[in-house]
Image (tube, grey):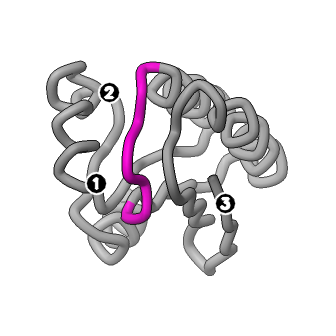
Amino acid sequence: MQLTVERRERAVVVTPSGRLDQTTVPDFQARLLEVLDETSGSAVIVDMAQVEFISSVGLRALNIGFKKSKAGGGSLSVVALRPIVREVFSISRFDKVLAVHEDLNAALAAVDAT
């Protein structure tokens, strides 16, 4: 699993790639929480376009990040879910927990609207 972080004017974009499963989530979660600590109160967008698979452990990491972001006055949303990842979000009803946007532009527009 690779992870890039891009600071933009309106938000921080975190882009994981590969699988978010038992073996990769500890690193992903640690880096996500680090980004949230560094950018407290900011909008963080997780670009999931390169994520091939997500397990319940990956959902848990996103939920922990969501709660941390919300507690710090920021926001956490996800964009560009692949069909298999979208299905996991839907079945688990996680798409009712996090804001899910079709693409980065839609997420940035939502940030501007708040």
Task: Look at the magenta stretch and give its main secondary structure.
Answer: strand
Q: Magenta residues, as a range?
A: 49-56
Secondary structure found at label 3 = strand
How many numbered tags mark residues here?
Answer: 3
Residue at mark 2 to residue at mark 3: CA–CA distance: 23 Å
Residue that numbered label 3 is attached to: 3
Q: From this view, report whether residue 29 is shown above or below residue 17.
A: above
* For discs 2 and 3, the disc positioned in front in the rendered view: 3
Rate crowding at label 3 as few (under 14), some (14 to 19) or many (20 or more) other CA atoms within 10 Å: few
Kind of residue at badge 1 = Leu
Residue at mark 1 to residue at mark 3: CA–CA distance: 16 Å
Is 106 part of what is drawn in magenta? no
> Residue at the front extreme?
23
Residue at mark 2 to residue at mark 1: CA–CA distance: 15 Å
Q: From this view, report whether residue 107 is shown above or below residue 93.
A: below
In the rendered structure, find residue 81 and report the number of the disc placed on it.
1
Residue that numbered label 2 is attached to: 97
